[in-house]
Image (cartoon, rainbow, N blue to C red):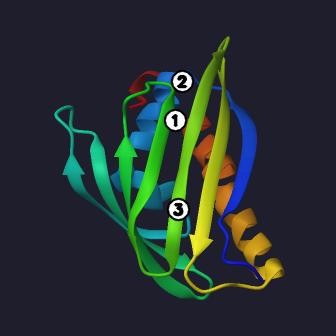
Amino acid sequence: MTSMADRVTEHTTIAAPLETIRAVLLDFPTYPEWAKDLKSIEVLETDDQGRGTSVRYRAAGMGRSTSYTLGYDHSDPARVAWKLTDGDIVRKLDGHYEMQAEGDATAVTYELEAELIVPLPGFVKRRTQGRIMHTALNELKARVEGLDGPSAP
């Protein structure tokens, strides 16, 4: 067991324009509709364009409820990036979605660096990382591709 941060990276292609994916990623209040482990989300602060800059999450994790607050950086339109500002069981939870248009689709890379306050056995960590990655990409892809064309956000 180690207390060093673990970094995971995954890639997928979503059949939607970058702007649509970004709109879903920035629509924080709807996350619990498609990210099954998230129980509630509260946008604490927004920038002058109404985008969440500080967002508190409550999630089911490792058999208990956990909460954490992420600070978002909106400086790059092809990237949604965040850093942990407060957490009850995590010391680090920093990551980003990087998006690149590819014709009618968008290549999406998800990277997350996480460090728990309490060390966990490797198999528990790997299972938890697998769930996070599944939500981060597969459930995002299902949500975006399930949106109805013109009425999409």
Tell me the amino acid under the disc marked 2. Answer: Leu
Q: Is residue 15 left or right of residue 60?
A: right
In this rendering, is residue 113 above or below 111? below
Residue 119 in the image: state x and y as whole percent: 66, 84
To which residue does mark 3 refer? 93
Give the mark nearest the N terminus, 1 or 2. 2
Give the mark nearest the N terminus, 3 or 1. 3
Mark in the foreground, 3 or 1: 3
For mark 2, does the 10 Å Cα neighbourhood hold few (<14), some (14 to 19), or many (20 or more) residues? many
Residue lying farthest to the right in this orientation: 123
Helix, strand or loop at label 3? It is strand
Helix, strand or loop at label 1? It is loop
For mark 1, does the 10 Å Cα neighbourhood hold few (<14), some (14 to 19), or many (20 or more) residues? some
Q: Which mark is residue 147?
A: 1
Q: Residue at x 47, y 42 (%)?
A: 81
Tell me the amino acid under the disc marked 1. Answer: Leu
Residue lying farthest to the left in this orientation: 48
Q: Is residue 13 left or right of residue 48?
A: right
Tell me the amino acid under the disc marked 3. Answer: Leu
In this rendering, is residue 7 above or below 4? above
Residue 87 in the image: state x and y as whole percent: 42, 74
Q: Residue at x 44, y 54 (%)?
A: 83
Work out how far the residue at label 1 is from the one at label 2, CA to CA, in angstroms: 14 Å
To which residue does mark 2 refer? 18
Q: Residue at x 29, y 47 (%)?
A: 53
Residue 63 in the image: state x and y as whole percent: 60, 88
Work out how far the residue at label 3 is from the one at label 2, CA to CA, in angstroms: 24 Å
Q: Is residue 89 visible?
A: yes
Give the mark nearest the N terminus, 3 or 2. 2
For mark 3, does the 10 Å Cα neighbourhood hold few (<14), some (14 to 19), or many (20 or more) residues? many
